[in-house]
Image (cartoon, grey):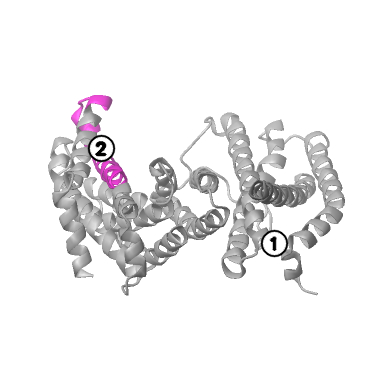
């Protein structure tokens, strides 16, 4: 019994079918509770008024945007090293979810920034890094679409993902060097344990973050299943053509 | 390796004007800038380092699809892949010849165009230094983009989409060094970081490019 057993598409689909209902339910409960609690049951901030509530969308989306790329990196490595097709397809399935999260983070940030900073957009390090991340996602998805042979496509996108990760980190530091920005520091520093958000805002935020994480997981499992079935259908089609 | 370099350079010089193309593009972009932002010399002198860097970067990008595409079409790449010379080395040589035919002329032409954009007198040395240090990185990263997209029909636009985000750190440090130099400040820090990026990419990127190329040729 090892983790690699689930590299078998049949076993993977079986497990993901069993897990998915619970995952969707948990994700729905967490997201709904987190957002409803955050939007309606927390007080307005002393200075920011009700605009503070966009944090319950903005922070979890930004968190998942980065983690989705990280998950793609791990999946790409597994594909390159152990050649498990499920892994490559999972990376492919995660990209559109990741780019959606990136767009949500950018848009909600702009909506919040307009009344607070007085501008929709500023060339601040965090904002710029996210824009660059968005471009990386775009290139990754475009490369998947452009290559016809599925194995070559998986190979090329995996290499792009590895190189892109290095350059994304590099860009992050380059951008920081280039311009010190407007964006506040992190509200929930995991490493130090301290935090700059008061408890009233903190608990719904954490629930919302967990909810977005579960939602991402459920979406990726669902989309990976779709990709596997799509490939099966293509293989069947090719076989029937050959026989005919 | 030297034979390969010689061949690539000869092809670039003699066949089909690939040599002057990047340079001409650089010239045109720089000449168009005053038309679009206006002829005020203070404004031009403020934006000159950034415009020159962006122009050089785009000129580099423009000539990238010639780096591997022609050799892919006539089968030279297949021969190179089976040759005793490692593909990593072959790609390094190709990137070097790309730099010699595109990057180096850009570095030499930049001061003249800087004159037209009213670049501050202090900035010339910094501009040349930053371009000389930065353009090799552009060629090596570009070779990676070319290797990924060489098997794709009409992959030129896709390659720009893949390569441009990878150019961000190089552009930031290079343009920052040139800008600080032009303002009379000390640009050593970005210049050192730029040199670090260039050396790092020269050392590591050929492996990624060769891996990508092997996957396409397989």
Instruction: Name the spot of residue A238 as percent of width and height, x first.
Output: 64, 49
Relative side of B213 to B49, left or right: right
Please name whichever residue, A27 or A200, is drawn nearer the observer in this view of the structure.
Answer: A27
Residue that carries the numbered disc 1 in the rendered image? A193
Instruction: Give percent across and percent down for residue B53.
Output: 27, 45
Looking at this view, is A40 or B164 the one in front?
B164
Residue B107 shows in the view: yes
Q: How many marks?
A: 2
Q: Chain of mark 1?
A: A
- Of residue B157 and residue B7, the one placed in the foreground of this image is B7
1 or 2: mark nearer the eye: 2
Quadrant of residue A34 within the rendered picture: top right
Q: Residue, x 50% and y 60% (percent of image)?
A: A159
Tell me, yes or no, whether the highlighted magenta stretch contains residue B40. yes
- Check contact, mark 1 vs mark 2: CB within 8 A: no
Q: State whether discs 1 and 2 lie on one chain.
A: no
Placement of B216 over or under A222, stated as above or below = below
- Report the magenta residues as a range: B35-63
Q: Secondary structure at mark 1?
A: loop
Prevailing secondary structure of the magenta residues: helix
Q: Helix or strand or loop: what does disc 2 sit on?
A: helix
Residue sitting at x 36%, y 66%: B81
Residue A6: image quadrant is: bottom right
Q: Residues within 10 Å of mark 1 (few under 14, many from 20)?
A: few
Circle number at residue A163: none
**Residue at mark 1 to residue at mark 2: CA–CA distance:** 44 Å
Residue B178: x, y in percent?
25, 49
Which residue, given by chain and number where applicable, does mark 2 sit on? B46
Q: Is residue B43 above or below residue A158?
A: above
Chain on which label 2 sits:
B
Q: Is residue A140 above or below residue A114?
A: below
């Amino acid at each position: 019994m090892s983790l690699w057993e689930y590299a078998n598409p049949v076993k993977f689909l079986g497990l993901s079918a069993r897990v998915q209902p619970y995952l969707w339910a948990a994700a729905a409960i967490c997201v709904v509770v987190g957002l409803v609690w955050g939007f309606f049951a927390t007080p307005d901030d002393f200075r920011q008024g009700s605009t503070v509530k966009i944090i319950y969308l903005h922070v979890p989306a930004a968190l998942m945007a980065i983690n989705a790329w990280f998950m793609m990196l791990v999946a790409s490595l597994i594909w390159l090293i152990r050649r498990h097709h499920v892994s490559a397809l999972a990376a492919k399935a995660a990209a559109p979810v990741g780019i959606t999260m990136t767009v949500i983070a950018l848009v909600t940030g702009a909506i919040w920034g307009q009344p607070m900073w007085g501008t929709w957009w500023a060339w601040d390090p965090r904002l710029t890094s996210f824009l660059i991340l968005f471009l990386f996602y775009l290139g990754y998805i475009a490369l998947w679409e452009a290559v016809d042979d599925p194995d070559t496509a998986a190979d090329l996108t995996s290499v792009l993902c590895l190189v892109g990760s290095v350059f994304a980190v590099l860009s992050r530091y380059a951008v920081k060097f280039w311009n010190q920005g407007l964006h506040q520091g992190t509200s929930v520093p995991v490493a130090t344990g301290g935090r700059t958000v008061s408890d009233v805002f903190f608990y719904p935020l954490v629930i919302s973050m967990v909810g977005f994480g579960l939602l991402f997981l459920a979406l990726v499992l669902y989309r990976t299943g779709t990709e596997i079935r799509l490939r099966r259908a293509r293989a069947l089609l090719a076989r029937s053509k050959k026989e005919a | 390796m030297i034979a390969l370099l010689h061949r690539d350079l000869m092809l670039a010089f003699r066949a089909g004007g690939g040599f002057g193309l990047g340079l001409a593009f650089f010239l045109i972009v720089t000449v168009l800038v005053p038309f679009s932002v206006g002829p005020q010399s203070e404004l031009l002198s403020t934006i000159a380092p950034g415009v020159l860097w962006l122009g050089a970067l785009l000129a580099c990008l423009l000539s990238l699809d010639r780096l591997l595409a022609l050799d892919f079409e006539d089968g030279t790449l297949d021969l190179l892949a089976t040759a005793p010379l490692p593909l990593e080395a072959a790609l390094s040589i190709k990137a070097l010849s790309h730099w010699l035919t595109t990057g180096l002329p850009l570095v030499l032409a930049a001061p003249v165009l800087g004159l037209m954009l009213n670049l501050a007198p202090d900035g010339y040395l910094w501009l040349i230094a930053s371009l000389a240090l930065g353009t090799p990185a552009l060629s090596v990263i570009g070779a990676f983009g070319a290797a990924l997209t060489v098997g794709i029909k009409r992959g030129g636009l896709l390659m720009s989409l893949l390569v441009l985000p990878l150019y961000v750190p190089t552009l930031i440090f290079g343009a920052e060094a040139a800008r600080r130099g032009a303002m009379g400040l000390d640009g050593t820090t970005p210049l050192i970081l730029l040199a670090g990026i260039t050396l790092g990419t020269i050392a590591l990127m050929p492996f990624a490019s060769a891996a990508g190329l092997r996957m396409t040729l397989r």
